[in-house]
Image (tube, coloured by chain):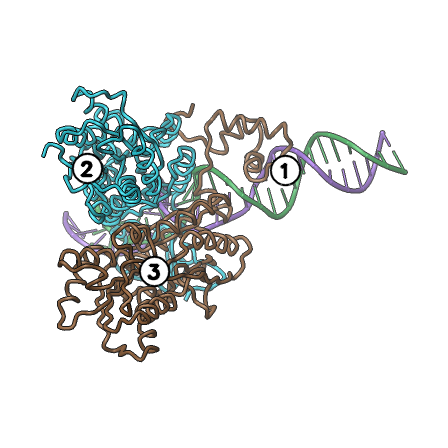
Chain colours: A cyan, B brown, C green, D purple
Amino acid sequence: MADASTVPTLDDVARAAGVSTATVSRCLNSPERVVEQTRNRVMAAIEALGYTPNFGARVMAAKRTFTIGAIIPTMDNAIFARGLQTFQEELHARGYTLLVASSAYQPQIEEEQIRALVARGADGLLLIGHDRDPAIYDYLRARSIPVLASWVYRPDGTQPTVGFDNRSAMRALARQVIAFGHRRIAMISGITDGNDRAAARVAGLREALAEGALDADALRVIETPYEIDNGAAALRTLMQAETPPSVIMCGNDVLAVGALRGAREMGLSVPEDVSITGFDDIELARIVTPQITTVHVPHRDMGRRAAEALIDMVEKRSAGVSLELECSVQMRGSLRDLRT
Amino acid sequence: MADASTVPTLDDVARAAGVSTATVSRCLNSPERVVEQTRNRVMAAIEALGYTPNFGARVMAAKRTFTIGAIIPTMDNAIFARGLQTFQEELHARGYTLLVASSAYQPQIEEEQIRALVARGADGLLLIGHDRDPAIYDYLRARSIPVLASWVYRPDGTQPTVGFDNRSAMRALARQVIAFGHRRIAMISGITDGNDRAAARVAGLREALAEGALDADALRVIETPYEIDNGAAALRTLMQAETPPSVIMCGNDVLAVGALRGAREMGLSVPEDVSITGFDDIELARIVTPQITTVHVPHRDMGRRAAEALIDMVEKRSAGVSLELECSVQMRGSLRDLRT
DNA sequence: TGCGTAAATGCAAGCGCTTACATTAACCCC
DNA sequence: GGGGTTAATGTAAGCGCTTGCATTTACGCA
């Protein structure tokens, strides 16, 4: 039983087992280098004393921590939760611990968190999106901390990314919408400032409009934080226009669900009076009525692949590879086919 | 600009500023003890070199880290996300960093995570629920790490808790259900083994049954992990019984939403054919149709209070106080009043 | 038995920081 | 102007661990 007044150290263990601190350390870090008999004695002492290595000391002496840090914009949303869960599972299976912090979509807080995690010895970092102050990348490079950007895919190879192309995914969905005969299109987007994913989704829609020879400039876009209530409010605003849209494409499912509620509150039925689309394909999208047409993102797979890629960067000190995952359009009840 | 090959240390800064390392350290930790002129010089050197303190070294030399660790059962569920968000906000406002890990509802993983967080110098820990291996409490006590249990309230004072009484909250809801004339009651619970909240909720229902002179032993309970699909499956099972229940009370909203879907899939309408209740009052509960009757838990408030309480324990080295928050029953469409 | 080699273990130098204590500088007052 | 105070800064001893190198031990073979 541990004494409540002092935490045992390597020294204590060494003394108890009658060996040097080096041997104890080796028992812990490369057991094969210690003969079994000695090892047993040491392990017994460790057990008896309830010894746990002091992490700070360990980090300082060695350089590895087997800790991976992840900073996500928010925990208050299932978008990141699912991917992070598999990310964590994979890390755990490989002997790493995941530490998560959230930035509330604020670059400055994200930066603080990055520093905090690095300071705490993270061997590698998972970040969402790729757009951030170059200074922070310099900081990380100076410390040779591998960084993997996820939830995005960036083919230009400036940095390793494991994710999907937000722009082309949204474009694919928009093409469908247009193919269904929709011409009066509006969008409820997340805040694009400082959020490359949100910006890319808007861009994807614009591209599809341009392809379809529709007036991309006339596109009505409302930007609002990703919250259900905001989606409802935005829909109300959009539907009160002189010529309300026939479809409202939302930056994510949370906004879409909000929009759906907004429509219901206005007495509009979906998709008869107005169609709604989302993005992400979180559970929410299939739970509401009608179910929401959205872009399916392979979150779980992304989490797993991201973990593999990041560990690879950490262990092999490799530059890292990018991997693009495919999204697919999920056609469901909230989008009406105007041709029929 | 930082040299990509070496990370500057206190020594480098000291040399650059022409002072001792002690002075640099003081500039960082108690600036008022350094005369302004010197301080400016030091700060300039820090800036120029892009210096950041090495955390491991700092932890080892000092004892504080201004880090709080939290271990939640899962991130993949809004139940903890919301409370954690305010917890984090409050911590941030007070100058602390939050590190989160998740245990996948597995005691053993939770234990690993506790050790990981403690090893990384967490000044205090937020844990969900109070039921766990006494050994882990010994471990924490030996290291004098303050621990606050949340999402539960334990009046017996064996340990500080900031949360609510799961049992009485569920009992209150069950009383309503009974008052509405329901007699054939079934429950879909989360896995109670190793989850004191889930167990308390079942117990609360049983109490209410006993009060109402209903046969608590005959209560049909299905235990299943908190996932939507599981809720749907469990409902199906329950409704296929010879005498199906008139109401299915669920251990949380996730299960309730699943049950709702299950009912729809079976062609049953809620609440005409069967009533459903939830617990937690997450957003999901108000988004589905009909909206789910549930127990409202003041997550945000709980997060904030928990942060205050924990910081208090950390800073004043106090034993900590418990705080009970009130839940309220939210009557909504999914529960039918059989008397009308 | 003695020597060589390899395996097991010990020694001790850091890792980068904080802080008690020592030293120096600055200033005040009689 | 010397002695006493106080403020500012420097010195150096750890904090607990890992690891390169030195030393010891064990063992095989001639």
Provide residue C28's location: percent of width, then percent of height.
81, 34
As rendered, which of A231 and A153 lies closer to the eye? A231
Chain of the residue on which disc 1 is drawn: B
Which disc is residue B331 wearing? 3
Provide residue B192's location: percent of width, then percent of height.
28, 66
State the separation of the CA atoms marked 1 and 3.
60 Å
Chain of the residue on which disc 2 is drawn: A
| Callout 1 and callout 3 share a chain | yes
Which disc is residue A295 wearing? 2
Relative placement, left or right, of A44 versus B312 is: left
Q: Are marks 2 and 1 in contact (CB under 8 Å)?
A: no
Q: What amino acid does circle 3 point to?
A: Met
Q: Are marks 1 and 3 in contact (CB under 8 Å)?
A: no
Q: What amino acid does circle 1 point to?
A: Arg
Q: What amino acid does circle 2 point to?
A: Val
Which disc is residue B33 wearing? 1
State the separation of the CA atoms marked 3 and 2.
34 Å
Residue A56 in view of the camera: no
In the rendered image, which quarter is residue A38 located in?
Answer: bottom left
As rendered, which of B321 and B117 lies closer to the eye? B321
Residue at image coords 40%, 26%: A135
| Of the image marks 1 and 3, the number of the one nearer the N terminus | 1
Chain of the residue on which disc 3 is drawn: B
Residue at image coords 45%, 47%: B67
SS category of the residue bearing label 2: strand
